[in-house]
Image (spheres, rainbow, N blue to C red):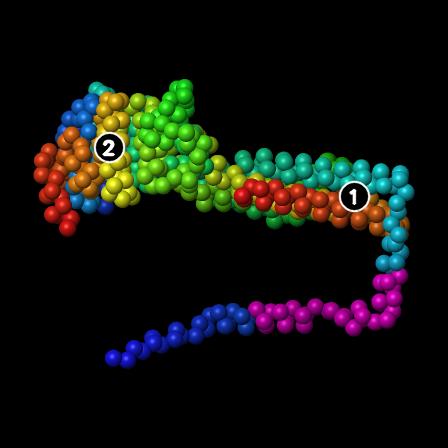
């Protein structure tokens, strides 16, 4: 008796149609945007770019300026750390109703609020809060906290919802109260994941804190805006290098901590 | 110790799971309950534990635990009763993976505000002495069930409910687990009710009850269940 292979599955036209649609969107996007590639690569454009870049070298290395840049870096770091910390506290609070533990209505309402918080970019939050809180790092910290609370609140809520229910049910069966079962069974399961999300958002917030300075929230961003507006390119170069070093340092620490958590 | 009086349970879809179940369980007894799949064995354990409620048509004293009617207790009081007077052993062990073995065993003591020193002794009693700081993922199935037994008995409950405790174990391990359970419940004097499909497990109990659609009755012919399931 000859064995025959079954016929091949039919072609999935849904996937092919979607791919063609995406290709069409890409082509339409390029066609609708006034991208002037040729002008970007003309001799004049290249010469102007090189002249601008040459203006950054060498960076300003005078000791008083380095000290000033150092303090600005500390301010940026503090903004990001404190903003993230405030966001974590808020997110833990918001995640309980958002995970459905207090009913469907509370879940829907809280998730809507978290969506609002995280849909507004940090720069917009900063623009609003700097009017209320005044110029300086305080407004910047609150802006970071507001946006990050929305992001972390949603992530924490999802982690709680997806936690294995069996350990908590087992404790409830054994006579634990609802809160004891949550703290002994569910929260320990989700804590490593929450810490990992927190560290990753802190990484993002270092970069965001640097940018917020541009709108007056202090730190390295404010220094950068000041020196660029006065065309003090060498000083601006020092500030940019400080930003790069700060981001690299925080990235490294965050990576090491997240790796330790997952071992 | 535990008395069931004309207990019935019907689910919302109209399916009657338990019908007029009456029995008295004495302190220190080791009772096995057997029956066909879907006859309500696990439902019976849930009702005894206060995790489910009997039909509204049942009397208020349908389930009496040490003279207290379960129906008279609110949710908090029922939770307190489970915490203080009952221990549970599940088929799937239900050992918390993020806690060490001694922390798992100590949970009922912590929840009852009792000193936790007995947890280490209990682990030694079930053959896991010296492994207090190991984690569940380092254990075999039989060892995890030993931890579950230790946790169920550490706070000296009056009533132990075991739902298929050997369901996930090979025959040799199951036998040693049941010997351990027998020995420990005799030393604590707990009334133990074990739901099981395994005739070998039922044979190690003091008494075997057969649960069916018409109620519950004692049986001495456990081999009948082998014939039915083969």
Q: Does residue A97 appear anywhere in the picture?
A: no
Q: Residue at x 67, y 70 (%)?
A: A30
Q: Residue at x 27, y 44 (%)?
A: B170
Towards the viewer: B1 or B58: B1
Q: Is residue B201 above or below residue A57?
A: above
Which chain is indicated by disc 2? Answer: B
**Residue A254 in view (yes/no):** yes
CA neighbours of label 1 inside 10 A, class few (<14), some (14 to 19), many (20+): many
- Indicate the position of residue A87 as horizontal and vertical percent values: 61, 38
- Residue B148 appears at what percent x and percent y? 33, 33
Rendered image: mark on residue A260: none
Q: Is residue A155 left or right of residue B171?
A: right
In what element is the residue under mark 2? helix
How many discs mark residues in the rendered view? 2
Using residue A103 as the reference point, say whether residue A56 is left or right of it: right
Q: CA distance from mark 1 to mark 2?
A: 71 Å
- Residue at 48%, 69% (x, y): give it: A15
On screen, residue B41 above or below A21: above
Residue drawn at the location 45% of the way across and 42% of the way down: A163
SS label for mark 1: helix
Secondary structure that dominates the magenta span:
helix
Instruction: Give, as a single range, the part of the protein colored magenta.
Output: A22-51
Q: Residue tagged by mark 2?
A: B179
Q: Which residue is mark 1?
A: A220
């Amino acid at each position: 008796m000859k064995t025959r292979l079954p016929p091949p599955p039919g072609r999935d036209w849904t996937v092919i149609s979607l791919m063609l649609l995406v290709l069409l969107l890409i082509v339409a996007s390029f066609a609708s945007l006034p991208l002037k590639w040729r002008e970007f690569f003309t001799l004049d454009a290249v010469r102007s770019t090189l002249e601008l870049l040459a203006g950054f070298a060498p960076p300003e290395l005078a000791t008083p300026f380095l000290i000033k840049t150092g303090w600005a870096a500390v301010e940026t770091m503090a903004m990001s750390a404190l903003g993230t910390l405030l966001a974590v506290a808020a997110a833990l609070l918001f995640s309980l109703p958002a995970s459905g533990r207090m009913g469907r209505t509370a879940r829907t309402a809280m998730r809507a609020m978290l969506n609002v918080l995280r849909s507004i970019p940090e720069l917009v939050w900063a623009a609003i809060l700097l009017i209320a809180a005044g110029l300086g790092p305080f407004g910047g910290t609150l802006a970071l906290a507001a946006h990050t609370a929305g992001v972390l609140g949603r992530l924490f809520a999802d982690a709680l919802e997806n936690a294995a229910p069996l350990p908590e049910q087992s404790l409830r069966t054994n006579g634990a109260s609802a809160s004891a079962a949550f703290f002994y069974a569910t929260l320990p399961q989700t804590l490593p994941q929450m810490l990992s999300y927190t560290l990753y958002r802190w990484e993002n917030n270092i970069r965001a804190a640097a940018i917020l300075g541009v709108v007056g929230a202090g730190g390295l961003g404010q220094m950068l805006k000041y020196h660029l507006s006065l065309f003090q390119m060498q000083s601006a170069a020092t500030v940019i290098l400080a930003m790069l070093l700060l981001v690299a340092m925080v990235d490294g620490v965050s990576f090491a901590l997240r790796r330790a958590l997952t071992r | 110790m535990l008395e069931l009086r004309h207990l019935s349970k019907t689910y919302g879809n109209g399916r009657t799971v338990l019908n007029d179940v009456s029995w008295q369980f004495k302190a220190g007894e080791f009772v096995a309950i057997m029956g066909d799949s879907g006859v309500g064995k696990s439902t019976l354990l849930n009702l005894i534990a206060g995790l489910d409620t009997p039909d509204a048509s049942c009397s208020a004293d349908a389930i009496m635990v040490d003279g207290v009617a379960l129906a008279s207790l609110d949710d908090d009081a029922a939770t307190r009763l489970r915490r203080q007077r009952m221990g549970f052993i599940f088929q799937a062990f239900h050992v918390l993976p993020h806690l060490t073995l001694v922390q798992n065993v100590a949970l009922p003591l912590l929840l009852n505000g009792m000193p936790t020193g007995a947890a280490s002794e209990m682990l030694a009693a079930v053959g896991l002495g010296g492994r207090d700081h190991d984690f569940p993922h380092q254990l075999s199935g039989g060892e995890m069930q030993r931890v579950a037994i230790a946790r169920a008995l550490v706070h000296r409950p009056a009533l132990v409910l075991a739902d298929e405790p050997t369901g996930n174990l090979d025959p040799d391990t199951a036998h040693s687990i049941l010997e351990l359970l027998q020995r420990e419940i005799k030393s604590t004097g707990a009334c133990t009710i074990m739901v099981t499909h395994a005739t070998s497990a039922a044979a190690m109990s003091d008494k075997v009850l057969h649960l069916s659609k018409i109620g519950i009755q004692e049986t001495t012919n456990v081999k009948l269940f082998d014939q039915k399931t083969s």
